[in-house]
């Protein structure tokens, strides 16, 4: 499977000021595969160490953290020499040995020639247990489920993916139905690597559902295994309430829907646990689209999504027959799958923060406000072809943003104040500053080869 994160890893390897790299992400999003594939393709040798229930590593790192001593111990463990220039050191489930996390500071300071990459599904949870973290001594990479672009490539639709990358929206419109069909599959299958891989091999929707159910069971087992016992029941109730929360017209998270009489303080730790391990995403409301958006966030109001659109469709019991009913899949579940999909594509954009907006009376709401660091871009995710955008127009009349975006099941169109993006191309929009990263250009759009405006592909503040 091709992952766009591989390009980031290659850039990290070539960096002059490279630090040990930590890959963060929920369980089963492909962290271990990515690290091992990177070692296989970019290095002569790989030294893979899994710290889960590894007594030898616990003993090795529990003594002093002298780098020379650690390297000798690691060489004995993997059974070969660790050449700092030609060997990738992989620390998997690194949160299970907190001292190994601490050692990254000493590798960075005293032995920066070693190439070290780490991952831990519950790393964020471990940090709340008092783990000594090497602040400023490591680099980070966030890994998410496969994006729609990666999904198409995994299914052998590289040409359609490349066409989207070209930015030739006129040609894209010609193959509109192909993209709609693939998007339907993505809503159902999602981007969890194992599910996508198996589906690419046999196109069996029933097997995909079974795999998704196993993943959801594994997540619930993690609750019992790793969370404090007194918090586990509340984590389960909160987790299982997310589909109900998103089924509402107003998707603001309401604690009393988790359990009658519930209050925010009752579920504070449970919510923190779900977000720290990457299973849930909080999207806070902002009171005004001013930069920085974080300063205008209403921390008491938020929408809660999960890690993957396919898992969400599994949790809601979405039936396979929905695919046969025109485009009703995109309206199913009050458009929650559409919002989940759009957020999922936004999350794959590096250093991009997403919020949502409502007016003071809650009579008008925008699905997302995206902070680029220097501007705020409103995004309306329409579940249908209907392009009435009262909330977006109301927002525009009040705040006059330089650019407004609407993504729907329609073709590309640039109006006076509004950019209409087809749902299947919303992922390829890059929010960023100049200069544009060449790797991002390949993933998003090579605008030099298209006659459409650069603004159609890259949002920038004026």
Image: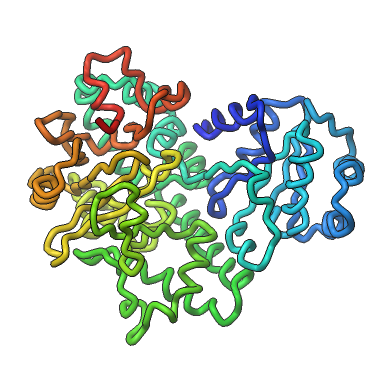
> Residue sitting at 25 percent across and 50 percent down?
289
- Which colour scheme appears in the figure? rainbow
64 in relation to 393, above or below? below
Q: Where is residue 311, by image quadrant?
A: bottom left
Residue 5 spot, x, y in % from top left: 53, 34
What is the residue that sits farthest to the bottom in this orientation? 261
In this rendered view, identify the residue nearer to me: 183 or 71: 71
On the image, the x and y values in percent for residue 191 come to: 44, 45
Give the quarter of the image for residue 277.
bottom right
Q: List x then y, in percent, for residue 101.
A: 72, 53
Question: Could you tell me which quadrant the C terminus lies in?
Answer: top left
Q: Which of the two residues, 459 or 184, is positioned nearer the viewer here?
A: 459
At which x and y percent is residue 186?
A: 36, 43
Residue at left offset 27%, top offset 66%? 252
* Number of callouts: 0
Q: Is residue 21 above or below residue 156?
A: below
**Horizontally, is 274 left or right of 414 in the view?**
right
Asked if residue 367 is positioned above or below residue 414 in the image, the reply reads: below
Give the residue displayed 87% in from the left and 56% down from the top: 56
């Amino acid at each position: 499977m091709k992952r766009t994160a591989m390009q980031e890893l290659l850039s990290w390897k070539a960096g002059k000021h490279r630090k040990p790299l930590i890959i963060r992400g929920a369980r089963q999003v492909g962290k271990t595969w990515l690290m091992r594939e990177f070692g296989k393709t970019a290095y002569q040798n790989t030294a893979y160490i899994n710290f889960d229930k590894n007594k030898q590593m616990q003993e090795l790192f529990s003594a002093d953290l002298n780098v020379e001593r650690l390297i000798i111990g690691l060489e004995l463990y993997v059974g070969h020499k660790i050449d700092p220039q030609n060997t990738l050191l992989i620390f998997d489930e690194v949160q299970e040995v907190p001292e190994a996390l601490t050692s990254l500071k000493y590798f960075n300071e005293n032995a920066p020639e070693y190439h070290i990459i780490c991952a831990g599904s519950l790393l964020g949870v471990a940090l709340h247990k008092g783990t000594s973290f090497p602040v400023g001594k490591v680099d980070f990479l966030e890994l998410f489920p496969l994006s729609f672009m990666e999904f198409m490539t995994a299914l052998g639709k590289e040409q359609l993916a490349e066409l989207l990358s070209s930015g030739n929206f006129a040609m894209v419109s010609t193959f509109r139905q192909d993209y709609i069909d693939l998007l339907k599959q993505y809503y159902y299958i999602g981007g969890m690597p194992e599910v996508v891989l198996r589906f690419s091999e046999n196109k069996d929707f029933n097997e995909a559902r079974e795999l998704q159910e196993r993943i959801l069971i594994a997540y619930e087992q993690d609750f019992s295994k790793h969370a404090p016992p007194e918090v586990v029941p509340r984590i389960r109730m909160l987790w299982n309430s997310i589909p109900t929360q998103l089924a509402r017209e107003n998707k603001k998270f309401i604690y009393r829907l988790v359990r009658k009489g519930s209050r925010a303080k009752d579920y504070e730790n449970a919510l923190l646990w779900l977000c720290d391990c990457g299973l849930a995403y909080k999207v806070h409301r902002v009171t005004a689209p001013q930069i920085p958006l974080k300063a205008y966030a209403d921390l008491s109001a938020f929408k809660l999504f999960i890690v993957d659109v396919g898992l969400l469709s599994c949790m809601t019991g979405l039936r396979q027959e929905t695919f046969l009913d025109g485009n009703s899949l995109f309206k199913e579940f009050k458009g929650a799958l559409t919002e989940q999909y759009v957020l999922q594509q936004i999350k794959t954009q590096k250093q991009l923060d997403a919020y949502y907006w409502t007016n003071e009376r809650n009579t008008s709401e925008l699905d997302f406000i995206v902070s680029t660091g220097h501007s705020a871009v409103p995004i309306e995710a329409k579940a249908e072809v209907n392009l009435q955008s009262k909330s977006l127009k109301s927002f525009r009349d009040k705040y006059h943003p330089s650019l407004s975006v609407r993504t729907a099941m329609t073709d590309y169109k640039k109006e006076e104040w509004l950019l209409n993006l087809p749902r299947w191309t919303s992922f390829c929009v890059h929010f960023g500053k100049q200069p544009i990263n060449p790797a991002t250009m390949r993933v998003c759009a090579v605008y030099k080869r298209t006659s459409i405006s650069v603004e159609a592909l890259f949002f920038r503040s004026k």
